Amino acid sequence: MTVIPHKVKRQGKEYYELIDVKRVKGKTVQKYVGYLGKNPNSKKEIELGDLLLYITRLLDKNISQEDIDSILKKIGIDYDAWPITKIIIENDLKMNKVFLKLK
């Protein structure tokens, strides 16, 4: 299974979604997996073990942008959202993967 970001234009705006691409009976089949929003880099696959060390700090209501930046660098996540207003941890049971989404 290969999951790729796919750009869609609606009403003059660009949105991104995850598409699962695989071969079935010799043909390429694409299947919608999930919505990424306006930025394809806003959703990153992560290892849950990497995140567990920092989860309580990330969920602290008074965390600073600098602390968030420091934690994400330690985990190995590059992002371009600034300031970060939402941190979403998503467990995708269909894909059996964990994602971290930043807004």
Image (cartoon, rainbow, N blue to C red):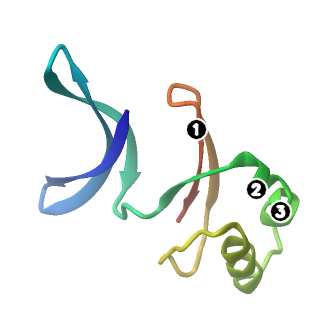
Q: Residues within 10 Å of mark 2 (few under 14, many from 20)?
A: some
* Secondary element type, mark 2: helix
- Position in image of residue 50 (x %, y %): 75, 56
- Position in image of residue 77 (x %, y %): 59, 69
Front residue of 7/14: it is: 7
**Whether residue 87 is situated above or below residue 8 in the rendered picture:** below
Mark 1 or mark 3, whichever is nearer to me: 1
Q: Residue at x 19, y 62 (%)?
A: 13
Left or right: where 58 falls relative to 12: right
Please identify the quarter of the rendering in which residue 96 is found: top right
Please identify the quarter of the rendering in which residue 29 is found: top left
Q: Earlier in the sequence, mark 1 or mark 2?
A: 2
The amino acid on which the numbered mark 2 sits, given as a three-letter code, is Leu
* Secondary element type, mark 1: strand
Q: Where does label 1 land, which residue?
A: 97
* Secondary element type, mark 3: loop
Left or right: where 10 falls relative to 72: left
* The N terminus: image quadrant: top left
The amino acid on which the numbered mark 1 sits, given as a three-letter code, is Lys
Give me the C-alpha separation between circle 1 and circle 2.
13 Å
Left or right: where 67 falls relative to 11: right
Q: Where does label 3 land, which residue?
A: 54
Front residue of 95/42: it is: 95
Q: Where does label 2 land, which residue?
A: 51
Asked if the residue at tag 2 contacts the one at tag 1, i.e. Cβ–Cβ closer than 8 Å, the answer is: no
Asked if the residue at tag 3 contacts the one at tag 2, i.e. Cβ–Cβ closer than 8 Å, the answer is: yes
Q: Residues within 10 Å of mark 3 (few under 14, many from 20)?
A: some
